[in-house]
Image (cartoon, coloured by chain):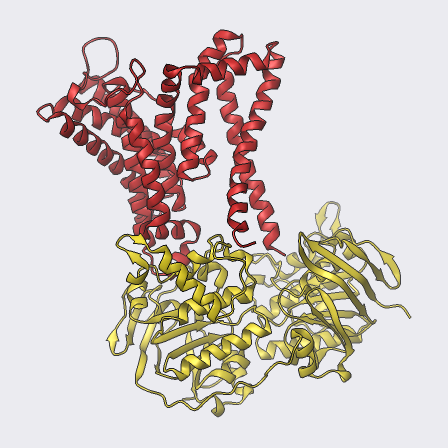
Chain colours: A red, B yellow
Amino acid sequence: MKSGMKQDSAFRAMVAPLLSVVGAFLVGTVIIGLLGEDPLVAYAALINGALGDVQALANTLQKATPYIFGGLAVMIASKCGMFNIGVEGQMYVGAMAAAWAGFTLTYLGRGAHIIAALLIAGIAGGIWSFVPAILKVRFGVNEVIGTLMLNYIAYSLTGYLTVYVFKEPGVMPQTVKIADTAALSLLVPPSRLNTGFLISIALVAVTYVLVYRTLWGYNLRTTGANPAAARYSGVNVSFMRISALLVSGVLAGLMGAERSLGVYSRFISSFSPGYGFTSIAVSLLGRDNPFGILIAAIFFGILEAGGPAMSIATEVPRELLSILQAIIIIFVASGAYISKMLSDRRVSV
Amino acid sequence: MNFALEARGIKKYFGPVKANDDLDLRLQRATVHAVVGENGAGKSTLMKILYGIYQPDSGEIFVNGEPVTIGSPDVAHRLGIGMVHQHFTLVGPLSVTENVILGVEPCTRGLIDYKFAEQQVREVSNRYNLTLEPTDIVESLPVGLQQRVEIIKVLFREARIIILDEPTAALTPAETSDLFRIIRDLVADGRSVVFITHKLNEVMEIADDITVIRDGRSVGSLTKDAATEKELARLMVGRDVMFSISKPEVTAGEVVLNVDNLTSESVSGDQRIENVSFSIRAGEIFGVVGVAGNGQDALEEAVTGLRRATQGRIELMGKDITGLSTAQIRAMGVAHIPANRTATGLVMDFPLSDNGLLGHQYRSIFRNGPFINRKAVNEWINRLIKDFNIKAPSLNAPAFTLSGGNQQKLILAREMVHEPRLLLAVQPTRGVDIASIEMIHKALIEARSRGVAILLISNELDEILSLSDRIAVVYSGRIAGIGDPASFTVEEIGLMMAGAGKEVV
């Protein structure tokens, strides 16, 4: 019984996500079967397309990178009991800020230029989450509303800046290219996997320590789990909520910077296929644990990178993978609900 | 002879937990049968089985000698079994009548016949002298009357067997004696009552027969005449229990807490405190008693910096602490056992190690700069577990796996160990077993002997009277009486709690 408790809860935390993934693939098998294709062939093509060689693997990790940043951003807010659905918007302003620094601060040397661009992107993302944080703490505006609304502003603002202020001549809605000194280096060219991925891995460890080993993290988790107990113990709950959303926004800003400085070498208007929103699912699948998020993000990277290969090898459309993602999310969400129901029942004895 | 209600060999397991393990209950017709036991003994589980909320794993139930299966509360109603829950199931904004007929509305041509319903409610109210007005809005009624609405609900469903779950928990002494009168009337009318409680003095006053439950088993079944409080307590706990608390003589020292003309704000419309003044010296227990909702929450929160004062001063060791933050006040040596351990005192999903740190996380001994010093924390909490005999599977076990008594001991340990100057103990023994009550009371007395000033806020008059050096009775946010407990009779205190007392200083 001594350490059984911890293992038991860690085990149970793993079970629901794993079952969800397995369940989703079973549903996918049925769908592929109904399309008259061989599921094994389709899945083999998927895996091969995502992990088959070094370039495929690099491509998978490149696609996973924004989800690592984004999942961590969602997690930090969630640990404090808040739902940051504004990661998308914070990412956009971060991406634009990084690109601006990239093509403007050209007098900086290579190292300084990258650091400055990342810093500015983080600050921009932080400002974008600070606004709903203040609205929540001072005026009681639910952070879900606040962060969501700022998404639209971010989207339109960066679009405006792209088209009317920093536009590259030509038809594409994108800014001029960043200076080489601001570019995040590619790790295995020609894949666009870049040092931003390494930064995201480092942040997995950093956020883990921050949440589980520091006083700030203890206060963060206490505020999230029981605000009344936090207040009772002397925690300034308003401060915790503001700082949590701020950190969340900074991570989202860096998420955008990785795209601008590492993948596109510029800001492209409406570049995101919904990275910020999918990050919510990643955080859910990763059970709000930094390492869980890393695994979940790579898993989503596999689905996205392997999709094209699957649809070339078979008649299965790549949209199936979006369906699988959605099914996984539904399973994980209901799994969390079911395990909560089970544990509630146990307590009510 | 058959019984109004009989349960034989009831077993109900929740996983490895034996909530009911071979329980028997025999309710004679037109009597009051008390079911006593500590929290967690299995009383509530048994009642939920009798009311059809749970199904027993094995065992038989008979109503009037007929074997029955009570598959749901609906079935219980049809068998004439009604239940008044400890936490009322009333709809506040609705009238008495609307609450009573909820789910069994008398209809004519698809419309509710309010006239008929009101007439029925009035009839029942008059018959048992419940003094309820059918059109009154329930949330405007005092707790004692709300409980009567629950009783009418049960009677309206023609219950012959009425289960009362801890019915006196929220009542004043006067309301309790009214309830007892109503119970006697119900019994005189041929109804049978199951009365669940852990208060032994009430058992001796109202019960005809008594069943004692411990660890899910019935450990004693006796008539009132054959029982004594001491014997019942021994059966409940499984060993002899000390009833009196021996308080050593302590000379009160300097003034630790001084509250001067304090008025607090009201949070979401609850009762604030108004113009409250008192002081507590080192080595003194100052007891504040009152019916729940008369400003106790405001007082607790104002002193600990959780609620703003709009007027007046709070001084700790002569220093003004009005307006300081909770963290600052804690750092000055104020410890706090909050009124609601699960909602405020603990984070139920957190492991013991994190819960033990709560309120002490700013102390430098538990930190290395910005990092938490896990080793120091765990060592400290292992000491708490040992010194206060807290039964817990491990440091990593979440707080919700502990029993109520052990949760409370964890809070007590955590708050006491750093030798506070002032200890604020609010409802320190609510919902814990007798053994833990003894231990908690002993710990408070020991702290007093060491010179801690203790502000004890409790709804349990017995607890206040046996522990306090001085008491204050609160009513409607004001102090209705303050002084030496010996200078009041229990009746006087009861009157002041009900707002009928005159100012005594």
- Write the residue at 28% across / 19% down: A263
- Write the residue at 26% across / 54% down: B369
- Write the residue at 25% across / 30% down: A94
Q: How many numbered dots are placed on residues in this image?
A: 0
**A257 left or right of B111 in image:** left
**A172 left or right of B476 in image:** left
Viewport quadrant of the C terminus of chain B: bottom left
Q: Residue furthest left?
A: A107
| Residue nearer the viewer, A8 or B309 | A8
Horizontal and vertical percent position of residue A277: 40, 29
- Determine if residue B271 is in view: no
Q: In the displayed structure, would residue A70 be above or below residue B379?
A: above
**A126 left or right of A37 in image:** left
Report which quarter residue B417 is drawn in: bottom left
Q: In the displayed structure, would residue A345 be above or below residue A129?
A: below
| Residue nearer the viewer, B317 or B83 | B317
- Write the residue at 46% across / 11% down: A309
Horizontal and vertical percent position of residue A170: 21, 8
- Determine if residue B322 is in view: yes
Horizontal and vertical percent position of residue B117: 71, 58
Report which quarter residue B68 is drawn in: bottom right
Viewport quadrant of the N terminus of chain B: bottom right
Horizontal and vertical percent position of residue B137: 58, 61
Q: Residue furthest right?
A: B1
